[in-house]
Image (tube, helix red, strand yellow):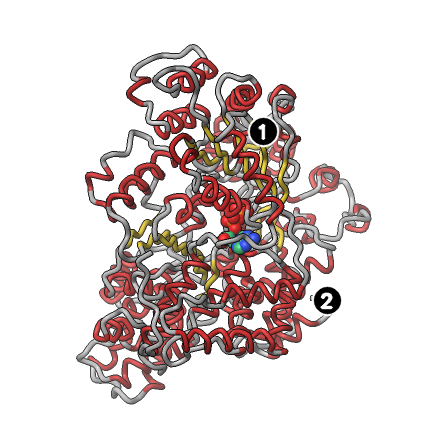
Amino acid sequence: MSALLQQPGYEEERLQTVSKKLPCREVQAGMLLSLMGQPHQYSYPSIFIYGHQSSGKSHVLNVLLKELELPHATVSFVECVSVALLFEQVLLSFFGCDAASLLPRSPSLSDFVRIYRQQSSQSPAKQTRYIVMEKAELLRDSDANLLPALLRLQELVEDNVTVILLSEIVWDRFRPNTGCFEPLLLHFPDYSKGELQHILAQDRNPSYSDEFYSAYINILLGVFYSVCRDLRELRHLAALNFSKFCEPLAEGKVKETDTHKLWRNIEPHLKKAMQTVYLREVSSLQWEQMQQMEEKENGAVRGLSAHTHVELPYYSKFLLIAAYLASFNPARTDKRFFVKHHGKIKKTNFLKKNEKTSNHLLGPKPFPLDRLLAIFYSVVDSRVAPTASIFSQISSLVTLQLLTQVSHGDQIDAPKYKCAVSMDFICAISRTVNFEIIKYLYDFL
Amino acid sequence: MSKRKVNDAPLPVGTCISEVQDILRKRLCHQQLPDTPEGVQAQHKHLLELLKRTAIHGESNSVLIVGPRGSGKTMLLKCVLRDLLEEKEVERNLLQVHLNGLLQTDDRIALQEMTRQLHLENVVGDKVFGSFAENLSFLLEALKKGDRSSSRPVLFVLDEFDLFAHHKNQTLLYNLFDVSQSAQAPVAVVGVTCRLDVLELLEKRVKSRFSHRQIHLLSNPTFSQYLERVQTQLSLQDDFPDKTFAQDWNASVKTLCEDKSVEDALQRHYNSSKNFRSNHMLLMLCLSRVSVANPAIKPADLLEASKMCLIDAQANMLHGLSILELCLIIAMKHLNDVYEGEPFNLQMVHNEFKKFLQRKSNSMYNFEQPVIMKAFEHLQQLEMIRPVDSSSVKTQREYQLMRLMLDNTQVMEALQKYPQCPTDIKQWAMSAYG
Ligand SMILES: Nc1ncnc2c1ncn2[C@@H]1O[C@H](COP(=O)(O)OP(=O)(O)OP(=O)(O)O)[C@@H](O)[C@H]1O
Ligand SMILES: [Mg+2]
């Protein structure tokens, strides 16, 4: 590991604490610290730090600014629903609540800068003041002047202030058309697998040995590393699945050192977790509950990602099928599919020059109501004469978001629809009414 | 001048370094004004004369300072003001109003700010004005001297001038220019902008009231001038407390600038941008590497700093993608090649990816659709891919058309640098067709 952080003007002890709290981020912390310089020295007016989620951007800054007791305001734009809160937060942190209360209702940037200048001329910065903006990309959605103004805040308020922006999006996507004060760019690289292992292993529960826990983290990374490198997410997964990993140990079936057996036990479990927890289909709490349930039932491993099953009325199912066909088949093929006794269907008959991609790759196309009804009447069992309730069923399919209504501005009176369900879903629905949908899909001819 | 006593006794190196950091950071990070701005003497003289005519002789005027970002417009103006205010009479008389298009986003806010800066809040009180013009002339009237014989000159500075042209009816600009033309009160209006086409933004009636004086800052230094500038920016002046240290430091800066590799690196920067500000960033990165252990800027420091400035940020981000995300990017690259940049959706990308998987028996990359969807969304969140149009709210996510915001070379370079990139994936990326 690299040497401890060094920078004159700070207490040796504090620097040591900082570097202990920032494993695998010593280089970045050192870089930042050298840019910040001694507390009283000017730092670059704006610094833009980018890197993937959980690459330690906020963590490093928090630790540095807190441990070294530097004047700072950290603002997360998610929390700051309005710029008013941003201004308030900054004034409050630097000058106290009296200053913050000077802001008028719905303050403008002009108000903020005026009050800031007023306050800082009364109490000039003895040390560089830092404003940290988390999720800086959200600044772009705000008032167009906010980002350029923050970038040159030092010039605007004439104070020793540095604005640090954090984002997972590269700076090039921020630059306004007429340019702005360019911030200094600093990259936080992703953690390597080894570094992740190192950091995650530090969360070890003291009742287990280092080797045992490391082995667990190693297995966990083996499963998840190819899809996810996000430390926060991995840490969450590690905590959630550890008890399962320990199970065979507790039951006395396996020794701590028998990594292979432990691996065989946990791997399917982790794979399943990938489908559920990782995708946030279930919350971690639910996942834990499900695990408990499972243990009670002592049943086989069930797939947890089964979609909510909708029970539809009989005609609605056919309507949905018809909608699916209308969405994925070219309209000119309808005759072939749905007019009885048409003769043999040959795909080459329809093939057009530019039709190189399958309709299933392009997604559903909108169709008018009459086409839907035409297909519906031909696929539904003809003995049952449908009534006016068809229309209400269509609208309830729309409400269930199985169909979407697309309105084109110029054709307000002729609504169009699109089918919004997946292939798997429609196949399942079709089976329940004994309809072989594959035979009617142009793509699968 | 109660500066620290300059003596010849050597100071501890720590103190010297600390002092160097203080001085140079003020220059590089705090836009400290130079004693004489370099290379803009003519502009400086022009502007100074112009403002003197208002401040001393009571003539009205208007002028625009135009130049690209970081070219020294603000610096020029501040230097001129500093020099102007050296005259006692000016200092006593001249009133200044500084507005910035970023802050005063409409004319009401601008007027409020003007009133405040002229200390007229109490005079205005609760008065209600019929129009902007009425309000402005009230302000100017209120500034008249006690004997009411003459007005005090007022300087209006409008930084980011072009933004004021977006205010409703350009009322503020119209009225300021109008006053600067009529002899109501001696005012000078100085606009500062980086838009060379700024006049085209002005309405006819506004434009016709503008003096059409422009001061351009389009400095285009030669490379040797640029090199010299780097040297002066880093050099210490005679008032440095430790003479010997200063001499050594300056000598080391000189050696630095003569180094061949440094010159090459600086040439690259010169070719991409010549303005002071981007130069300051580079030098600041060098300065940050100076410490007691490394008491001078070495060529390696500058090269390292230069590398940091020129690095491709997108490549940095690609490095941190998961292997699945990287595979999706490769699939998109292939789609881009085959369909000549036509947009694609997730289904197509997934399909392309599957084609690759089918050719391999390895099941390592068999991910379910939702996992792939999540990866796809992550790429979108990182703005590596962008939806073609946002109007398609009702399209299902997997069919939304997207474009890849990276070019082929970026993708290929990222692959080379990707940690432990499997060979088959590299080959897939390099193959002509997916
Ligand atoms: N001729 C010069 N001599 C010395 N320093 C200069 C010169 N020109 C510019 N600088 C320095 O370059 C930096 C950028 O200049 P300045 O802020 O005036 O640019 P600007 O044109 O106002 O840019 P923007 O359009 O972004 O406001 C400042 O630190 C300034 O001191
Ligand atoms: Mg400027």
The single residue placed furthest to the left in the displayed view is A207
Residue drawn at 58 percent across, 29 percent down: A407
A279 up-or-down from B234: above or below: above
Number of callouts: 2
Q: Report which residue position mark 2 lands on.
A: B433
Dot 2, how many residues are within 10 Å of its Cα: few (below 14), some (14-19), or many (20+)?
few
- Are discs 2 and 1 located on one and the same chain? no
Could you say where residue B202 lies in the image, as x and y percent from the top left? 62, 27
Subunit that carries the residue with mark 2: B
Q: Is residue A2 visible?
A: yes
Q: Quadrant of residue B44?
A: top right
- Residue at 69%, 66% (x, y): give it: B434
Label 2 vs label 1: CA separation? 38 Å
In the figure, B179 relative to A432: above or below?
A: above
Quadrant housing residue A384: top right
Q: Nearer the viewer, residue A431 or B319?
A: B319
